[in-house]
Amino acid sequence: MKIISQLTLVLFTIVAVTTSVSSAANECKILPKVLSAYYDFNQQKTHNVEQQKKPLTAAKKTQLFELHRYNNRVLQRDLSQGVNDIWSHNGNRLSLNRAFEQYQHTIEYQSNELRYQPKWQDIFHLVAIPDLNKMQLVEQKNSGCQLEQHYIHKTKTSTYQLVWLPNLELVKFFELKSASLTRQWSLTNYQGTVEQITALFTQYSRFQSTDYADVGDNESTPFLAAMINQGFSASQNTQALHTHHEAH
């Protein structure tokens, strides 16, 4: 009986250790609110059968974007344009600091100056995707940070494909296809190093800053004078930045 008891104890210990290791492997230690993600964005005209017989004149256009989250702040970097949007979410209010890399200058917008306001979840995800509850889950695989959920969704005019990382609240792949256009977002890398993320926010906090309401009073500054001459608008530029990744 003593031997049996000892064997039972050993087996129980093995099972407990195995379960512990398995649970650890299923955990994701990267926090969704503190991470960086890197994306390729491709946009191409959709061709029907007749068009495919003709030479392809429109080349696929690829852009690089970065998403950096730090609690209630999100930094979206458009590397091709040198424009970086730092969003803050306090209560139900959004504020935006738009940092222009070339000029080392930031324009600050308050909530009431943003006539076009994206949803916080779209800012948080970078990509405006349909509500997951309205999409069809077709596959789930992997575990931990790599847990993937594959969704599809069809409307009268568009088809959506989504690979979602629920433990990171992150889009891994998203395709929106209509009769005239195909848009694709592809995650190329992600990481959760706090020091690197905070360093980026600190970098842009050192830029010279001007309130949007004061832009017209600072024509002596070459950068601001150029903005005025170009008819710079908070609503136009904010909406333009988000148009290419709106899903609905």
Image: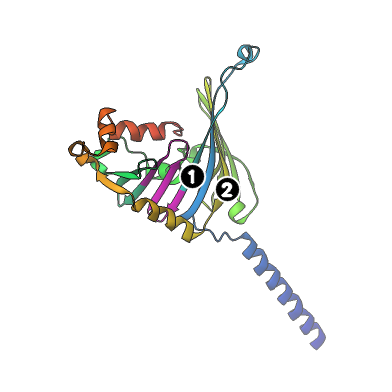
Given the image, on which type of amino acid does mark 2 rest? Asn
Residue 94 percent coordinates (x, y): 31, 46
Q: Quadrant of residue 243?
A: top left
| Magenta segment main secondary structure | strand
- Position of 243 with respect to 184 (left or right) is left
- Position of 142 with respect to 36 (left or right) is right
Label at residue 144? none
- Position of the C terminus, as image quadrant, is top left
Label at residue 189? 2
Residue 36 percent coordinates (x, y): 50, 51
Q: Is residue 101 visible?
A: yes
Residue 235 percent coordinates (x, y): 30, 33
Q: Secondary structure at mark 2?
A: strand
The residues colored magenta run 68-86
Which of marks 2 and 1 precedes in the sequence?
A: 1
Task: Write the residue at 38% across / 31% down.
Answer: 240
Q: CA distance from mark 1 to mark 2?
A: 10 Å
- Mark 1 and 2 residues: CB-CB less than 8 Å, in contact? no
- Count all numbered tags in the image, as a single digit: 2
Circle 1 sits on which residue? 66
